Amino acid sequence: MKEKKPIEFWKETVEWIHQSWMRKKGRKYPFMARDFKQLQLLRRYFTATEVMALWDSYLEASPFFGPKTGYLISGFWEERSILLESANFKNRLAMHEKRLGLNPAAATIGAVGLDKACKMGG
């Protein structure tokens, strides 16, 4: 049986979602199995820091996304192309790269590119 490759910064990504949800809602994010699957799907197309920056943008866009999606990870996936264009995305991305000790100059928008990632179904 082929061993699964661990997802880089998986623990940090999940913990960031918990921490930011705690600041917004006063409790940890109520993860279910489907949430982890959707996060794994996101991580196929985006780096850990991109996912964290997108999540930050998602939570900050409360008047637009909150009532529509309930801040669920499934809603986060659906709105990814809009979130990539948000004003704070690049700033948040740089913050997370610095926090994790990564080289911002080496960062790219996901493994398959922005256009493909935005058009992916799911």
Image: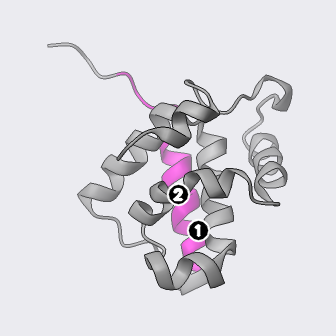
Question: In this picture, which residue range is highlighted in magenta?
Answer: 5-23
Instruction: Inspect the magenta stretch and tell me whether residue 120 lies in it.
Output: no
Crowdedness near tag 2: few (<14), some (14–19) or many (≥20) residues, C-alpha within 10 Å: some
CB under 8 Å between discs 1 and 2: yes
The image quarter in which residue 121 lies: top left
**Dot 1: what SS?**
helix
Please say whether residue 15 is one of the residues in the magenta stretch.
yes
- Front position in the image: 61 or 16: 61
Q: Nearer the viewer, residue 43 or 29?
A: 43
Q: Is residue 27 visible?
A: no
Amino acid marked by disc 2: Glu
Relative to 109, residue 30 above or below: below
Residue at 50% of width from left, 85% of height from top?
A: 67
Q: Is residue 5 left or right of residue 19?
A: left
* Count of numbered circles on the image: 2
- Residue at image point 54% right, 59% down: 79
Q: Residue at x 39, y 40 (%)?
A: 41
Q: Position of residue 77 (x, y in %)?
A: 46, 55
Q: Above or below — where is 80 with respect to 68?
A: above
- Residue 21: which quarter of the image? bottom right
Task: Kindly identify which residue carries mark 2.
Answer: 15
Q: Position of residue 22 (x, y in %)?
A: 56, 77
User: Quadrant of the image for the N terminus?
Assistant: top left
Q: CA distance from mark 1 to mark 2?
A: 6 Å
Say which residue label 1 marks.
19
